[in-house]
Image (cartoon, rainbow, N blue to C red):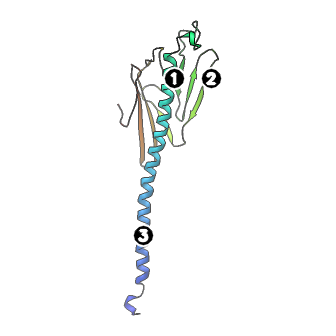
Amino acid sequence: MRTSEEGFSCMEVLVVVGTILLVMGSAAAVGEKLLLEAAVEYETACLVSDLRWVQQHNRTASDEQFGKFPAARPTTTDDYWVRLHRTDYEVRGYGYKKFKGWTHVCQPMVFLGSPVNIEGARFKEGGNARKVMTIHVYSEMGTRRADRYVIIDAAGRIRVDRKPP
């Protein structure tokens, strides 16, 4: 071996290791974004499903024949509603069996927020929304961020958008 070629294989190994680290680092950044998007998408789907469940029960709540709610229930009480918190939401209701509902706890990195009304989503007997509202479902990790907006309009339509209304 010549003295001018000494250490060349060490330099090759360093270049290859550096290249591998660069590829793995860029893959980790993409994986982090995918993880955030998947978590927010899952929590949004759960929230929309529960909102639609509440809305459907309020649509059919006025018919005592099917054992839904008593005719003499207080007029100021919503039959079912979703109360929002920063890291979870509760589905609550009023009915024959004093429905206590359930609480859905979001994944640790997903949060709920609403610029309009954080008290809760409520629907009238016909399924129309009591208040128009937007629920912000988001997650952030470092500089990465994933957002979804659950929009409830006056007619009771529930839709999901990636951009704020």
Pointer 1 local density, CA inside 10 Å: few below 14, some 14–19, many at least 20: many
Q: Secondary structure at mark 3?
A: helix
> Residue visible at 41% across and 39% down?
147
How much space separates mark 3 and mark 1, taking CA atoms?
Answer: 54 Å
Residue on which disc 1 sits: 54
Q: Is residue 20 above or below residue 84?
A: below
Say if mark 3 contacts mark 1, CB within 8 Å: no
Residue on which disc 3 sits: 18
Q: Which of pointers 3 and 1 lies earlier in the amino acid sequence? A: 3
User: Which quadrant does the C terminus fall into?
Assistant: top left
Foreground disc of the pair 3, 2: 2
Q: Tell whether 153 sits left or right of 76.
A: left
The answer to which image quadrant residue 9 occupies is: bottom left
Say if mark 3 contacts mark 2, CB within 8 Å: no
Residue on which disc 2 sits: 100
Q: Secondary structure at mark 1?
A: helix
Q: Tell whether 162 sits left or right of 40.
A: left
Amino acid type at image mark 1: Val
Image label count: 3
Foreground disc of the pair 3, 1: 1
Outermost residue on the bottom side: it is 2
Pointer 3 local density, CA inside 10 Å: few below 14, some 14–19, many at least 20: few
Q: Which is nearer the eye, 103 or 140?
A: 103
